[in-house]
Amino acid sequence: MLNVSLFIQSIVNGLNQGAVYALVALGYTMVYGIIRMINFAHGDFIMVGGYTLFYTIPLMVNAGMPAWMSVIIAIAVCTIVGVAVERIAYKPVRGAGSMSALITALAMSLFLENLALVLFGANPKSVPAIFNLPMIDFAGAKLPGKALITLVIGLAIMLLLQIFIKFTKLGKAMRAVPQDKQASTLVGINVNKIITITFAIGSALAAVAALMYCSTYPRANTEMGVMLGLKAFIAAVLGGIGIIPGAMLGGIIVGLVEIFVKVYLAPGWYEAITYGILIVVLLVKPTGILGKNIGEKV
Amino acid sequence: MLKVNNLNVSYGAIHAIHDVSLHVEEGEIVTLIGANGAGKTTILHTITGLKKAASGDVLLYDNNLLKTEPSKIISLGMAHVPEGRHVFPTMTVEENLEMGAYIFNSKDDIKVGIKDVYQRFPRLKERSKQLAGTLSGGEQQMLAVGRAIMSKPKILLMDEPSMGLSPILVKEIFSIIEEVHNQGITILLVEQNAKMALSIADRAYVLETGHIKMEGDAKELMDNDDVRKAYLGV
Ligand SMILES: Nc1ncnc2c1ncn2[C@@H]1O[C@H](COP(=O)(O)OP(=O)(O)OP(=O)(O)O)[C@@H](O)[C@H]1O
Ligand SMILES: [Mg+2]
């Protein structure tokens, strides 16, 4: 017998977790799409967001504002950090080969984590409650309001991003640059500017992911971005790295698989099974679920 | 309108372009011919900022192009149809044309521009919603030309537009070039198909291993014995 209420709860939790992965995966995939580089420091942007929330939520609340408004500050801080990392560390090694870029990204990741260790100490910080919402009854299931609201936020942002990328001039430029940098320059797109904007958007999405994550797991520590980043990276590869809808799909799949394996199969096995799925998908389709090899005539 | 003075370009230790000077005047079709690896593409890339020069000058009117941010060059009235088409493969035909008008903001003007291109290339209109990467080589070349025209250039640089096309399509592309020219766009045409290029050009330059070997009236060069032997296979 299927327990309907548990099933619905798992769907919501899975989608919620998946939306967090998806938002982070978007950051990996957009950057990879443009400069063919895995930004290993991207997961650490979530940590930057987490600490920003920890420090700014009390200020918001004292000022009589809702706690979640701190996400605006987190977005600003993460964007600045993301753009600074790109400008200071990545831009100088662009064109120096993928190994240099990889090592620089790993170094940036370690740098951010250790900087946080110096600034904030090793003890985890307890992030204050972000959403004070009651449990909501739905088809006999009791669902936490905060899970529903973060799920709605996550999905809404992904939808907005799709619309932005598909229909706006800037969005089209962001699609054009990964396809052909030379042609992009020739039609008048400043490629460096687009790369910076891509980092800014990716970092801002990481800040939103931090808000969603901390509303469920209210703790900030220096390593919070490591596992989250890794899972989101897997999600990006699963969906097809460099493909924006692929990151969203991959994120949702990883989130759902994780929750369902935890609830219905074996709690200790969810990571092994997530990696297993990744490996199987890549064996069958090396370019990821939405990856395609379009015939490019030269 | 376009002046290249004593241009030198290197790839690392390879000195690809040696002291090249050339000029294109308003209303001309000028062609630059030469064998594989002569340096034709390198010259065009340097003019539009895709490649850095070692020394020399490139002037478009009074603008020093070597000191201009590459993405700004198209706004000065020069468009470049690159070798190998370089359409955006996972964008539709229509989106590719829109990207050609990236420097413009008025949506209405862009629509008019797209309509003009469709009139000139009915085949592109039929395929407006098709991804550019799935077009045939000839269609991609038309799209690349259409995209360049979307920026309303005064001068158009074209790099081997006939490459890889069947003889019928080569004829079609050359008649398109003449049509574009008749609309008042100046043309600098790089070609390996010297016969076709010389037949539509006013003046020509012959490039050999990075040096300008000959220059002059296109019709005269067509009758020149060295050119006939080396490039016209006569
Ligand atoms: N990216 C590069 N790195 C090193 N050498 C290069 C590079 N691009 C071109 N070259 C060299 O510069 C010279 C000129 O090349 P270029 O592509 O300009 O010739 P081309 O006249 O356009 O030839 P084709 O007719 O085959 O297109 C060649 O010797 C080529 O090997
Ligand atoms: Mg060439």
Image (tube, rainbow, N blue to C red):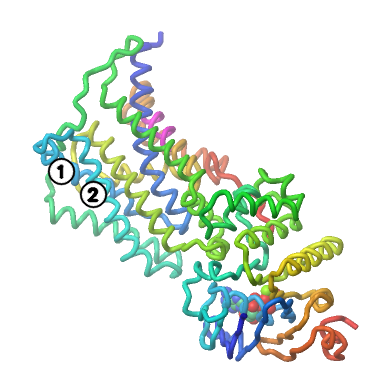
Reply above or below: A192 against A210.
Answer: below
Residue A48's disc is 2
State ligand 1's quadrant. Answer: bottom right
> Is the CB atom of the residue marked by disc 1 within 8 angstroms of ligand 1's nearest atom?
no
Q: Quadrant of the C terminus of chain B?
A: bottom right
> Disc 1 on helix, strand or loop?
helix
Q: Nearer the viewer, residue A295 or B43?
A: B43
How many numbered marks are there? Answer: 2
Which residue lies under the disc numbered 1?
A56
Q: Amino acid at mark 2?
A: Val
Task: Please give the chain letter of the residue carrying mark 1.
Answer: A
The amino acid pointed to by label 1 is Thr
Span of residues in magenta: A251-258
Whether the magenta-drawn stretch holds residue A285 is answered as no
Residue at the right extreme, as displayed: B234
Residue at 74 percent of width and 80 percent of height: B33
Residue at coordinates 71% horizontally, 87% vertically from top-left? B208
Q: Is residue A255 magenta?
A: yes
Dot 1 or dot 2, earlier in sequence? 2
What residue do we see at 37% from left, 49% from top?
Answer: A201
Q: Secondary structure at mark 2?
A: helix
Chain letter of disc 2?
Answer: A
* Mark 1 → mark 2, Cα distance in angstroms: 12 Å
